[in-house]
Amino acid sequence: MNHVKYRVGKWLPSDRSFLNSWIEKKVNQVKHSNLPLSPAISDLRDAIYNDPILFMGFTSMYDQIPQGYNEPVKNFETMLLIMNQILQEAPCYSNIENTIGLVGFPINAILDWAMGTQGGYLTFTNTLVNEKLNAILNEWKLFLQSSDSQYVLTDGPIFQPQPDYTNPIGWFSPDALEAIAAMDPLRGQGNDPQDALANFIYNYQCDPNAPYFGYKSWDDFFTREFNPGVREVSDADKDPSVIVNACESAPYNCVTNAMSRDKFWMKGQPYSLLDIMDNHPLAEQFGDNSTVYQAFLCAKTYHRWNSPVDGKIVAVQNVLGTYYAEAPVEGYDPAGPNDSQGYITEIAARALIFIQSDNEKIGLMCFVAVGMAEVSSCEITVNVGDQVKKGDPIGTFHFGGSTHCLIFRPGINIDFDFHGQTPCLNTYNIPVKARIGVITN
């Protein structure tokens, strides 16, 4: 059996035929649905037709897709209709060859080729376009936070409104629970059960005897919390010199030579700290040769953020950014949006949380939560002046999460623990609140 492959984080399948089949079914669905345009979609459509630059961009991005790329979406009108349909749907599990269909980025999927064109680069970095996209994604967020999205939180088949999925089933079906349990880095260890249903009940706050396992919405399910005691900072890691994992995430990159300002759009996607921190006044304390640790989140796991150190919250900021911009150096690589992990730290919608560590050797550090594509709602749950302990909650992504960074000032030497891995695009999750580094100076 040929299993569908995934891009990093398992947000989208890598198999183009699988993606194209999904999109073709979506195109056919919207042609027959006659669903009225939502206010946010209608607003973007009006903006495109009323602005010649936007009209040129949205038109050219489809005209510029090279022949032979077999893009099912031929123009921005079809793109808008599909986006409009998605706003009334919650992601479900697809029972075909152990895949999860388009759980992560359905809108990203329909823009996949268009994002890699010159028109796409210019359009998806346009401030007005991103304002309109923000309104669209907020509409979807409201649906995903409503009880209307509960229909995918079942243990059986799902019929409507997902005719584009093959054998859609609910998230508490055995296959879907197995997919979630498979991402648990501690599965089968200690008290953590191997059985998929038992694994979910053991790990996550839920009520398996209540409808929808007690979850009020898709978002409530997706931002679920661990049960007390399941992920805790160990006694040994309470040592002030230890840094713990801020998210249930897989290590992507770690550098000790990040510059204050760099050409982040070039090959290698170097970090540009002033750009990442949106020129925040505290960014001046992070000069050349700072350390950046970056890790990505998986579509099926825990999406909350936790403090990596003991300290005081000294500043927080949400940064409005892009949603569908990828690194120009990726070209038409179908994994381009996904492989732009470094690039998006400077331009995507993100949250900054500056923490003054109680450990003077660490001092000021910054946690950066980076939204990518549909994952754009970065909710900060701490306030300036709050004291936090290692592992305390500080925020969450809504509808998943993509990537995050820990940034440390120059001169701080950290012996990182990648749990037997080399940071890259093919790593596995390190448990949240587990040790990832020790200060050595």
Image: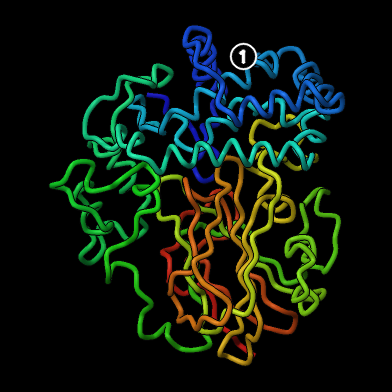
Q: State the residue at coordinates (80%, 40%).
A: 329
**In the image, 291: left or right of 24?**
right
How many marks the image carries: the answer is 1
Q: Amino acid at mark 1?
A: Pro
Q: Give SS at disc 1.
A: loop
Q: State the residue at coordinates (57%, 26%).
A: 83
**In the image, 301: left or right of 348?**
left
Residue 436 % position (x, y): 51, 72
**In the image, 426: left or right of 282?**
left
Residue 2 % position (x, y): 42, 25
Q: Which color mode does the image show?
A: rainbow
The N terminus sits in image quarter = top left
343 above or below 283? above
Name of the residue lying farthest toward the front: 39
4 above or below 324? above
Q: Nearer the viewer, residue 91 or 129?
A: 129
Q: Nearer the viewer, residue 401 or 150?
A: 150
Task: Count residues near mark 1 (Cα–Cα under 10 Å), then give few for <14, some for 14-19, many for 20+.
Answer: some
Q: State the residue at coordinates (85%, 64%).
A: 261
53 above or below 385? above
Name of the residue lying farthest toward the top: 32
Residue 196 % position (x, y): 23, 46
| Quarter of the figure with residue 94 | top left
Q: Nearer the viewer, residue 197 or 253?
A: 197
The C terminus sits in image quarter = bottom right
| Quarter of the figure with residue 154 | top left
Q: State the residue at coordinates (46%, 41%).
A: 142
Q: Which residue is mark 1?
A: 72
Residue 312 % position (x, y): 56, 83
